[in-house]
Image (spheres, rainbow, N blue to C red):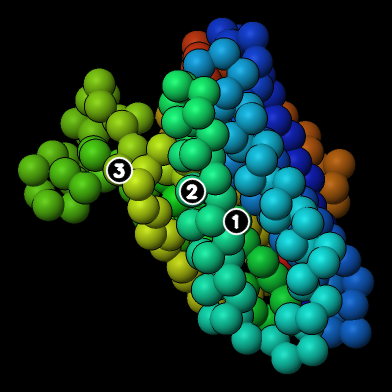
């Protein structure tokens, strides 16, 4: 499997600081191309959200450089998912300790995907998302939010959830929960596209608009991929989204 990747992170129209952190690693190995993509949406006063998201991204960048080479000797995506989960639990405790010392709260979402050979593993905490795009737009991750839980219980409709004042209330996030239990997903990589985004990207545009821009046949090269991404980001800003906006788009072929 070969990959083309483009990424953008925009501070948006309202906030002075971009609290999102994004990470893309793309390496050639004896097993073929390996790609790791991560989006973390930080939250907290002043620059604390930025600190939380950047801390997590730095830890995973270090994992890719120092630990991944050993994993490639005998690839087991389930084992890697377990190690990512352990790393997030450890980071959660460290950020909690920092918050306690500083007397401030901070945290971050985490949505990450790793492609090796024809397999992927996704690890997820919070309400950033990972999508797979072929003949349709498929949300792979499950939002860990109050409204998503209420929708799943039948207590709220999807339409109600979109406008509910509690739509950004997270059930867990790294650095602000006593315990985090990441969602881990294993899958076979399909030709088409994969997209990671913070929630600021998706609130003001429809799934139909996302699909229309990111339909794989339109993503012929990195220049076109970035053009389509920029178009959607500008639409989000025109519609007065107040959050930071981050997107990673991956074409698998």
- Residue drawn at (54%, 81%), measured in percent from left and top? 78
Q: Which residue is mark 2?
A: 93
Measured in 3D between alpha carbons, the distance from the residue under mark 3 to the one under mark 1, in whole angstroms, is 18 Å
Measured in 3D between alpha carbons, the distance from the residue under mark 1 to the one under mark 2, in whole angstroms, is 19 Å
- Residue drawn at (84%, 84%), measured in percent from left and top? 31
- Label 2: element kind: helix
Residue 112 visible in the snapshot: yes
Q: Establish if 26 lies above or below 213.
A: below
Q: Establish if 68 lies above or below 38.
A: below
Name the side, left or right, on which 189 lies relative to 166.
right
Among the 4 quarters of the image, the one containing residue 66: bottom right
Q: Which residue is mark 3?
A: 171
Q: Nearer the viewer, mark 3 or mark 1?
A: 3
Where does the image place residue 207, in percent across and percent down from the top left?
45, 42
Which quadrant is the C terminus positioned in? bottom right
Name the side, left or right, on which 170 lies relative to 70.
left
Q: Establish if 253 lies above or below 77.
A: above
- Residue drawn at (68%, 37%), measured in percent from left and top? 54
Q: How many marks?
A: 3
Mark closest to the chain's N terminus, 3 or 1:
1
Q: Which residue is mark 1?
A: 112
- Label 1: element kind: strand
Mark closest to the chain's N terminus, 1 or 2:
2
């Amino acid at each position: 499997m070969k990959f083309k990747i483009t990424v953008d992170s925009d501070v948006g129209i309202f906030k002075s600081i971009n609290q999102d952190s994004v990470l893309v690693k793309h390496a050639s190995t004896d097993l073929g191309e390996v790609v790791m993509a991560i989006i973390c949406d930080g939250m907290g006063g002043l620059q604390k959200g930025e600190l939380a998201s950047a801390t997590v991204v730095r830890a995973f960048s270090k994992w890719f450089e120092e630990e991944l080479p050993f994993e490639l000797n005998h690839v087991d995506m389930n084992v890697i998912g377990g190690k990512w989960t352990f790393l997030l639990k450890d980071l959660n405790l460290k950020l909690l300790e920092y918050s306690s010392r500083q007397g401030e709260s901070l945290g971050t979402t985490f949505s990450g995907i790793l492609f090796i050979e024809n397999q992927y593993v996704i690890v997820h905490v919070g309400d950033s998302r990972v999508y797979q795009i072929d003949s349709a737009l498929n949300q792979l991750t499950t939002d860990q939010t109050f409204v998503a839980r209420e929708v799943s219980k039948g207590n709220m409709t999807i339409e109600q959830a979109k406008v509910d004042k509690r739509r950004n209330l997270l059930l867990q996030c790294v650095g602000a929960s006593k315990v985090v239990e990441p969602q881990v997903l294993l899958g076979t990589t399909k030709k088409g596209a994969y997209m990671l985004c913070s929630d600021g990207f998706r609130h003001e545009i429809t799934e139909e608009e996302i699909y229309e821009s990111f339909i794989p046949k339109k993503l012929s090269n990195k220049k076109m991929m970035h053009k389509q991404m920029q178009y959607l980001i500008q639409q989000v800003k025109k519609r007065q989204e107040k959050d930071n906006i981050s997107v990673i788009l991956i074409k698998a072929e």
